[in-house]
Structure formats: structure tokens, C-alpha cells
Amino acid sequence: MVPRILIVGTGSIGSVYAYIFSRTVSAANVFTVCRSNYEVVSRQGLTINSTVFGQNLKVRPQVVRSVDEAVAESEGQPFDYVVVTAKAIPSTPSIPDQLRAAVSENTTIVLIQNGIGIEDIYRSAFPSNPILSCVVYLPATQIAPGTVQHSEVELLHIGTYPATAPPQHKDSAERLAALLHAGGASAKVHQDVQQQRWSKLLVNASWNPICALSRSRDAQFLHSSPYAPDLIEGVMLEIAAIAQASGYPSISSSVVDYQIGRATARSLPGVEPSMLADAGSGRNMEVDAIVGNALRIAEEKGVDTPLLRAVYTLLNALDGSFTRARQAKA
């Protein structure tokens, strides 16, 4: 039986995966929840320009405005996979509550979201369903509604949540990887994917907030003052200490040195992290998923993180200013 897939949050990442899934299950079985880009995508479909998959690639999935609309359009047929590529930002109703109508007892929930500690709200809402926590490396940008530019790499790390999930949930992870491979994508299944989450968080929870707060790309920030490299290193070392206290010793000072070396080697202006792009557009950022949750884990583990606390405090205030600005316009 051909799997039916619902993608919730069809921005840059969701668009690329809509294309990948359509190559193996057909676009007729791929439903995409679109919001700001709904009008364009419903008329024209998605266009992917990728150095990995090819240029001017077209895909026309089933385009809907909400999960409820997707359920109505599916005419009672259940979804095998609900893939969440929306940003991990608090909402009312919450994302798990939005998903309820689409989740049957056989649905696998796939979380392609940044941050750490983002899975519990889904596990609480759907205690019996397979929850797959995924770490994505896919540099993509939606340069216009429904048009995505993708380059360099495409890789999805997959693991069950929790890592001790039953064998049938592990089988769901393997089936998802096989589905992605059949669509020409790269995927790797891990017994415990949280190590990959911490590895990515080391970069995300340092560069993302600091670039957003300074309105600078990574290379620009490193060149901004003689103290800049030490600040980045200090924040990264605090994140590494949290990871080690959580049972992931491979997130070490040598990994910090490697990541700083990567950024130092970049020519100006450097890379624009997602929070910098969000801040430039006045959009809310994944403050808690990427920084706040790490701080809470640090407090639980007794790890002192003065730099990360300062970054979080400033970032949270900046994020709040965007909410106030929208409310003032309403």
C-alpha cells in the first residue's frame, strides 16, 4: 500500500521533503499545509532549485491551509506519516493539538525541528504512536513563495523518541529511511539520535542568538571585535558541558574548536543563521527550543552557564519586541 504523508509547515525544509516524498509515493499522496505561501503553491505548486537534486524541479502536492482541511480532503483515508517541519515556536492551539485529527493509531509522527527537548509535548499527546526525532542538514531558503533554493548537502538523522522505544517504533524509523532513500535522499537511523541533536545545538544555540542580537553574519561577528571569538567559544563550551552532563561526552572541546575553525575560515560576510533572518523580518524565533530548553537542562544537571543565561535573557527580550510590534499594528 502506498504511504500517505502529511507535511505540516511547508517552508523551505518542508518543500524539499515534499519533493523527495513525491518521487516515491507520488504527489497525490503528499499533503502539504501551507500558510503564508498558500495562494502561490495552490496555483503553481512548488519549485525546487537544488545543487543536489537539480534545477527548476516542479512538484504539485495536495495543498491545504490546515490539518483539518487535509483530513477532509483525504476522504477518511489515514495518514501513515505526519511530518512536522514547522518551527518549534509555542502556538495556540499547540502543534500536537493541531495534529490530532490527522493521527490514527498507525500514524508515525516525524519531527524535523531544531533544538533540544522538543519531543515531550508530542510524546504526551500521542503516547502510543511512533515518534521519530530527526536532525536535518539541509541549507535551504524560500526565496519567493513556493520557490526554494537548496545547496551543498541533504542528510536526515533519524531516531525514535525515546531511544528505548519498542521494536515496532524502531521499524518505523527504518521504513522512513527506506522511503527517503527511494526518493533519492540521504538518511541515517540511530539507536539514540540525541547525540546528533546536541551536536547541532552546539552550533545553533551559539551562532543563532548571537548573530540575531548583533545583526551580523557569523564571519562579520568574528571580525567585529577582539573579544568576539572568545564569546562564541565560551558559549559553545557551556553547551558542550550541558551535553556531557546529559550523557554525551563526544560533544567535547575539540568539537568546539572544529566548529569555531569552520566559521573562522569563512570569507566575509559569512553565513546567515535562521534567527538572524527571522530577526531581520521581525518574526518570532525558536528561543526556547534552541536556547531555553538547554538552560533548563543545565539547571537540572547543575551546570553553570552564565554566558548562555545572558544570551537567553537578551534574546527573549528581542523576541518579545517582535510580538509587541505586531500587537501594536493589529
Image (spheres, rainbow, N blue to C red):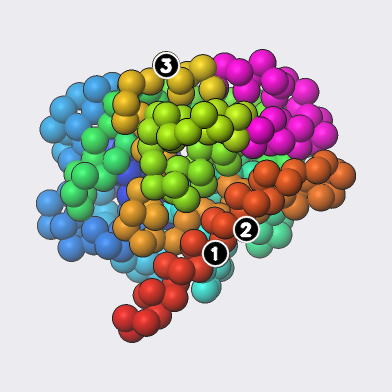
- Kindly indicate the quadrant of the structure image that contains residue 53: top left
Q: Where residue 116 sits: x, y (%)?
A: 64, 44
Point out which mark residue 317 bears.
1
**Residue highlighted by disc 2:** 313
Residues at marks 3 and 1, CA–CA distance in whole angstroms: 32 Å
The numbered mark, 3 or 2, whose residue comes first in the sequence reads 3
Magenta residues? 234-259
Labels 3 and 2 touching (C-beta < 8 A): no
- In the image, 16 versus 128, the foreground residue is 16
Label 3 crowd bin: few (<14), some (14–19), many (20+), radius 10 Å: few
Numbered disc total: 3
Q: Where residue 50 sits: x, y (%)?
A: 24, 28
Magenta part, dominant SS: helix
Labels 1 and 2 touching (C-beta < 8 A): yes
- Label 1 secondary element: helix
Taking the spot 60% from the left edge, 29% from the top edge, the residue there is: 230
Q: Is residue 213 above or below residue 23?
A: below
